[in-house]
Image: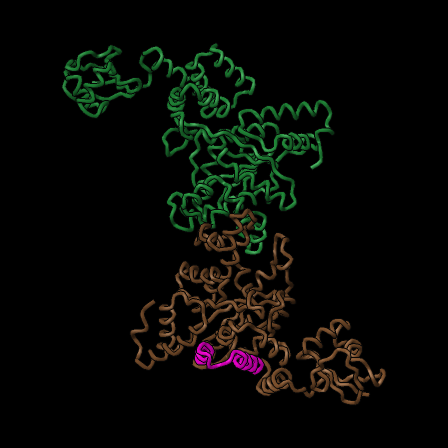
Chain colours: A brown, B green
Amino acid sequence: MENFLEKLTSDQFAEVERQFKIYHNGVHEIIPAEEFKNKLAKSIFLSKPLKIKLGLDPSAPDVHIGHTVVLNKLKQFQENGHVIQLIIGDFTGKIGDPTGKSVARKQLTNEQVKHNAQTYFEQFGKVLDMKKVELFYNSTWLSSLNLEDIIRLSASITVARLLERNDFSERLSTGKPISLHEFFYPLMQGYDSVELESDVELGGTDQHFNVLMGRHLQEFFDKEKQVVILLPLLEGLDGIEKMSKSKHNYIGVNDEPSDMYGKTMSIPDELIIKYFNLATDLDVHEKESIASDLTEGKLHPRDAKMYLGKTLVRMYHGLEASNQAEDHFKAVFQKGTIPDDIPEVVWEGESTALILDLLVELTLLPSKSEARKMIENGGVRVNGEKVMDHTLSITVENDLIIQVGKRKFVKLTT
Amino acid sequence: MENFLEKLTSDQFAEVERQFKIYHNGVHEIIPAEEFKNKLAKSIFLSKPLKIKLGLDPSAPDVHIGHTVVLNKLKQFQENGHVIQLIIGDFTGKIGDPTGKSVARKQLTNEQVKHNAQTYFEQFGKVLDMKKVELFYNSTWLSSLNLEDIIRLSASITVARLLERNDFSERLSTGKPISLHEFFYPLMQGYDSVELESDVELGGTDQHFNVLMGRHLQEFFDKEKQVVILLPLLEGLDGIEKMSKSKHNYIGVNDEPSDMYGKTMSIPDELIIKYFNLATDLDVHEKESIASDLTEGKLHPRDAKMYLGKTLVRMYHGLEASNQAEDHFKAVFQKGTIPDDIPEVVWEGESTALILDLLVELTLLPSKSEARKMIENGGVRVNGEKVMDHTLSITVENDLIIQVGKRKFVKLTT
């Protein structure tokens, strides 16, 4: 590829630097970074958008903000006029697991693939402008490859190279079987890039080997090689494991505003900056100043999380919903005041009751001993007043409010 | 597969044993032998011939008696009414070496494949009745396999299993590259057996892995599994390396009778029994008695080799030629007399010449110094008389015979 950087005017060069800074923010690695700058230069010099590829597994269409790391990166490219290529890996989806051993990789019908793709697009639409996205199903080209094509394709790669992939080498060395067909999945993913002449492919760090395969095969087929952008994997709410539905540590893009906000408040402080960088659409300068304010102690982690939660709700539910979610949180959790929308219960018992009986009968706590403990820990309030004595007797009146812990409220009606 | 052995009459059982003994003679291994007996029993019980498969590489059509080891085995099957399946591996031949690294495996055109196959058949016709042989080109079925077929096929085998093949494991451990496409060749060879529902596949011991692949894939495709017969590799004239054209240690089936006979006489004594067993069409009892006579010293190795040479010439040139070859050998090499059919040269030089000049001018020896050495070693005769003096002057007469070494003769005409 010729050097386009040296052909640019200084304004054009500044534009390359501006875009590069945006795309570079929050990524794990760009391979190779210099070639990526030159691709940007070529795009600007020739006024031709880059083709930015993302491959999708059609078997798991539930989108959470772990997935949005890559979507937000795509959005940055889209905002600068580049073209997004979304590829539904329907070919492999339809094959499933030919050994029949993996329950996870079961064979999908055409209808299921279409349905899952549709589910993706609806959720992706919350981040990307889907009207401008190019959609592909890789069965279009893969299903017509014959044995001769495949032999030529596989002549481009050595067995040793494939065994470099972490999971393969580990399985071979520990005696766990690798079926030969598994060697094809990276090749097929790479061949998609050949077919679509992609300029850039995005993927999580766990996709390192597979996305580089596209670069390798493009070279083998005498095409311009794609650049690879690896994005960090986002840890879930527990702060330890990769965010995933099965680990129950995720924030779904379809979560209700109050859940989304509340879950965000529960992430460990160490992850705040990473979530801002990877999961939000904020301007890169704003992200940087939040990061430095946090590090220097000018911004309290709680306040940063509140802004993070508000931002996520705004991204997926709009500005109004984000303001409401914030108000709700402040009302309940911060000021210790009583929110407006608490559940009302009609009290049909005696007009006087012991506090322990009341807490158990209203199912606010599971047993009298639990109720007693909660009172001793200062976790029970009646009309906003902390209850200090577990033998307290209460006179039940209309609109009496009982609060347990930070979030549980009941208003009694007589 | 059900047990057919227990369904047979005692006559039928004796026929299984008779055939088994013939096929078992000289082989390296039958995998598994019991299953093979049962296949023979089935064939006899149902009066249905077995399908005996041999795969051929279309790039090397020169047939020598190293190749006939397997042809002779096929002939035994043919003589008992079984059907020979010859498969020209034209699919791989037409692909060649997609990495472009191997000169040996260059891409063949359709015409070359056809021509090479024809060359095979002509030479094979010296052993087999080609009218009864079934011929196949594996491109017929392989070229229509698509990626989905191939993924299912390769799901049947693990990478670890493929790496068990000696040459693969050796190359992987010594860091020599294995291209992924090389993994397909055994799979394709195996798939041929699935397609043709072969009962038995023959191969040299160096084909151990590949022929077993047919058995593996037939099982994967719910077919009756083939039995594998491995035949020893025949050492060449040097007695050390596998017979091959490139090693110049071979006896070609198209060699002239006297060459064929003479080359046979040059093999090391230790190989006589192996050559009889593997390269001749003699009855198994005759082979056994030759072997025991040789071992017990009742048969002189030279006489055994003469019979071997005569047998080989008879197989490829007929009875008359074999008798002539024997007579020729006896005349030249045994009695020390002069053969009938020596080349005649018209002498146009002086009527008197020095022996050294004569030997060089007749190109019997390359230089005078070589000629002098040969005389000193007793290797030159004139009219049957050994020349003792290298300064000898010869009077050239009509029909003067000059002999150099054991085999070179010239008769002068004046």
**Residue drawn at x 74%, y 86% as measured from the top left:** A401
Residue A313 within the magenta-colored segment of the rendering:
yes
- Front in this rendered view, residue A131 or A77: A77
Residue B60, quarter of picture: top left
Residue B70 vs residue B270, the one in the foreground: B270
Q: Position of residue A396 (x, y in %)?
A: 80, 86
**Would you place residue A193 above or below residue A296 in this image?**
above
Q: What range is drawn magenta here?
A: A288-315
Residue A240: within the magenta? Answer: no
What is the x, y in percent for residue A31? 40, 65
The quadrant holding residue B341 is: top left
Q: Which of these two is toward me, A175 or B246? A: A175
Q: Is residue B239 left or right of residue B19?
A: left
Q: Nearer the viewer, residue B179 or A401?
A: A401
Residue B103 on image: x %, y %: 37, 45
The quarter holding residue A359 reads bottom right
Give the main secondary structure, helix, strand or loop, of the magenta stretch: helix
